[in-house]
Image (tube, helix red, strand yellow):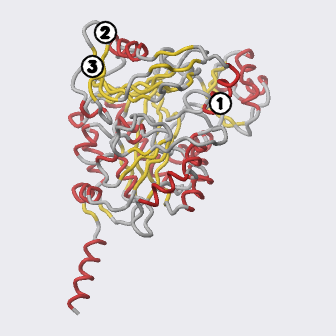
Amino acid sequence: MAAKKKISKKVNERTKPLKGISDIRRFFYKNETPIYFISATNFNLLGADEWVKGFKFICYIECFDGQHPNVFSPDEIPHDEFQSIEDINNYMLEHKQVVDYIQSRAKGKNKGKALFLMFDEKTEKLAKKIGLDVAFPTAKLRNDLDNKVITNRVAEKAGVPCVPNVLTKISSYKDLEKKGDKLGHDWVVQTPFGDSGHTTFFIKTEQDYNKHAEEIEAEKEVKVMKRINCMGSAIEACVTKHGTVVAPLMTELVGFKELTPYKGGWCGNEIYADCFTKSIRDKARKYTRLFGDQLLKEGYKGYFELDFLIDTDTNELYLGELNPRVTGASSITNHAVFALADVPLFLFHILEFMDVDYEINVDQLNRRWARPENIDSWAQMVIKHTDDTIKQVTRAPKSGIWKMKEDGSIDYDRMDTHRRSVDGDDEAFFLRIMKEGDYVYEGADLGILVMRGRMMTDNFNLTEKSKKWLAAIQNKFESVEPTQVNQIQDKVAEIGGFKMM
């Protein structure tokens, strides 16, 4: 009888709900469930391994030259051409080294949880085959919500305003003129899926339309919006059983020709206490909670990000798009002071997919995270190859902390796995994506630069400081013209056309 009582007490302790932030922190520090982030790189969840015992990154691209203690990158083996990040993840889930690695860390029948940036139904089947649970809503639901037309309809149900628009089939320029007449004659047309400006088209004339007619007319329905003068912003949140937890609003770096070849393409973020006006920040938080609460009704739980557009003529705030996932902004969100003082946003996501009950006061948490004193200033830029050329990299800067000298040149200072130990204005963290031997092409990601403070002026131009850092990092890359152009073009086709983060 005594033995039975001890067992019963142990079970009761294990099944007691986690009460508040301190219990949640302790739970993850003692975690025994293997948890993996499987993706092209570990950029999106940098630092997650410091919060969760047993958290590992399985990456196609080795950004840290084997120096990161919790990154596993398998040897490359023959594979079909990659057309998406989903293809990369599916390749890795079928890779013997990856399967063996996961099996070697299994806790009996508990193979672990898998997090992805992007995945499809094939990914789900492959994960299940090797015993992993996907810690996200289904690929089908994510794909449906990722559709910009469906996002618009979810926003309408949530009471979140969108830029004046019409959702319709477009068959010709005349058809666009007719259906978009009430919106004026300067439009932004978006196809249902796409990223970083790839499928957002600015149309004022028939000539503009003809450049993208094939893509627009191929869709059953597109979003036709009135063109407004706007600034981009981003906000991340997590749908939990207790409500929607909302992180602070961030600016977006968009369309800088020094960083991206895509007009309207995302290329970074800033987070700081007085981002935009208090009225805009409060409105963005309110809309994000409303949208998150509606997502729960749609069957979605976990991490998501919203892009908001601020009309500079009217100061109105409109929903731009939804990303039902962790994103390129997640690294900024999860390392800010508010997150370090409590827990990072992604931990609430993981909790929703763990076999544990927990209690949090969402209202209290959101109020605390909105306070200016809980927000420090950081910025990141995603650096792409902007020229319409193909070259082979012969030298690339290492990932880690770099230091700038008075003459504007930089030296590698020390290895680090994320921005944590960047001290002052003369230091920055760089995550290398493109390594020696790789081929760069228009739109290819070279790397991500992270620093304290802002990268943009109040007028949303790049600061002189950020320009100096950009030039210094770019100068650390060296490349040559390829000798076998046809073979190189085939290789580029393998990884082109989709973003790696």
Q: Quadrant of residue 388?
A: top right
Q: Which amino acid does label 1 sit on?
A: Val
Q: For this view, does 164 lie left or right of residue 411?
A: right
For residue 83, which numbered disc appears in the image?
none
Residue in view at x 42 percent, y 63 percent: 106
Of the two numbered discs 1 and 3 in the rendering, the one whose residue sits closer to the viewer: 3
Q: Is residue 115 left or right of residue 227?
A: left
Earlier along the polypeptide chain: callout 1 or callout 2? Answer: 1
Seen from the viewer's position, the closer of residues 399 and 406 is 399
Q: Which amino acid does label 3 sit on?
A: Lys
Q: Callout 2: helix, strand or loop?
A: loop
- Residue occupying the far top of the picture: 407
- Choose between 372 and 485: the one closer to the eye: 485
Q: Residue furthest bottom?
A: 1
> Which residue is at 71% across, 15% downward?
205
Gap between marks 1 and 2 measured at Cα: 45 Å
Q: Determine which residue is flagged by label 1.
A: 224
Which one is earlier in the sequence, the residue at label 1 or at label 3?
Answer: 1
Residue 408 is labelled as: 2
Residue nearest the viewer, comparing 78 with 501: 78
Q: Residue 440: image x %, image y %?
A: 56, 22
